[in-house]
Image (cartoon, rainbow, N blue to C red):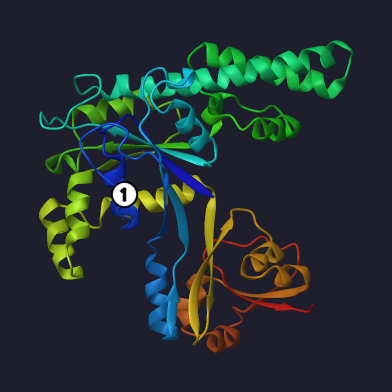
Amino acid sequence: MKAGIVGLPNVGKSTLFNCLSNAKAQSANFPFCTIEPNIGVVSVPDSRMEKLEELVKPERVQMATVDIVDIAGLVKGASKGEGLGNQFLGNIRECNAIIHVLRCFDNDNIVHVDGNVNPIRDKETIDIELQLKDLENVEKRLEKVNRAAKTGNKEAQTEKALLDRIRETLLQAKSARTVVPENNDEEVLLESFQLITAKPVLYVCNVDESSAVSGNKYVDQVRELVKDEDAEVIVLSVGAEADITELESYEERQVFLEDMGLKEPGASVLIRAAYKLLKQQTYFTAGVKEVRAWTINIGSTAPQAAGVIHTDFEKGFIRAEVIAYEDFVQYGSEAKCKEAGKFKVEGKEYIVKDGDVMHFRFNV
């Protein structure tokens, strides 16, 4: 599962990517600096891991991760191939969610492709290009399905009805994610269309350092604009985040954050939000060799969770031994959880909860 960072050129995408991944994507003051999409495997900050490490004292610790993709800046006309349009749209189609970066700071030394700072216009530029590309794909699909629908084919008629609604939505300059499937068949169909504007999105307002805590007038405009989108808005000073990553020690970083009025780096907030946006959650395995956070889709069953460790675990699944994270922390060990009756044995139907501490029994 991948979240793609998108936006106009020069809004801070590559600098943000560097902060998130500690990869060194080229970052410069001109458009199309990132041409090949950079992919960073980013650890998901989770305070629960520190507590488990403290209790279990393992030889090593392995955090959960999320893949972040830095994609080239998009310009007007991208849907028709302008700039790096076709490549941009192909790269974003391969992602599962969108992190849309908006420039919300004034700085005469950093050029803006449209001449001045206006995050509302910038958002609309990106949205329109993505909507136009989706509209092109929907209309191509409608050409094919219309013929089958006229013959009385029920599946084709269902698909046509959904495509007509999506087309109407896109023509109103609204994204496909605002179309609510009316039943399970439509839900499956909508996912199969792989429309760019159907992907979940969160907005990152890149502000100056003084606005990192409470935002500014630009952030207020963005919040007002997206209030009906069911999308999270995160305020982040990408320049300050870049300075934080350059500091060597934890203590230095904490002093920097305190001076800014922040409790933790904004990058940490963003990574957790991206993880959530991808509908991911974490379960733990905890032993003296290793304490590890494993990433699964929300709603995964115990065998599916076991399969993340190894496919044999899923194939030969017998049972899962489960302790809730809160109980593990309260009682301090697996043995004490057993004594307190907090150790559960679950079968194939068990839906894993975020934070479960698990051990699997299997036979292949």
Picture coordinates of residue 336, whole percent (x, y): 53, 87
Amino acid type of the residue that numbered disc 1 sits on in the rendered structure:
Ala
How many tags in the picture? 1
Please give the residue where the numbered disc 1 appears in the rendered image: 25
Q: Residue at x 41, y 17 (%)?
A: 77
Asked if residue 26 lies left or right of residue 343, the reply is: left
Please identify the quarter of the rendering in which residue 264 is found.
bottom left
With 118 as the anchor, is 204 left or right in this view? Answer: right
Percent position (x, y) of residue 146?
Answer: 77, 13
Q: Position of residue 11 (x, y in %)?
A: 26, 34
Graded by Cα atoms within 10 Å as few (under 14), some (14 to 19) or many (20 or more), the crowding at tag 1 reads many
Q: Position of residue 330 (x, y in %)?
A: 45, 78
User: What residue lies at 75% left-to-right and 32% top-to-bottom?
Assistant: 185
Horizontally, residue 262 falls left or right of residue 201, namely left
| Residue at (28% x, 25% y) in the render | 119
Depth order, front residue of 246/291: 246
Question: Is 172 located above or below residue 83 in the figure?
Answer: above
Residue toward you, 176 or 6: 6
Identify the element where label 1 is drawn: loop
When the figure is inspected, residue 133 is found, relative to residue 335, above or below; the finding is: above
Q: Quadrant of the C terminus?
A: bottom right
Q: Is residue 136 above or below residue 46?
A: above
Question: Which image quadrant is residue 229 in?
Answer: top left
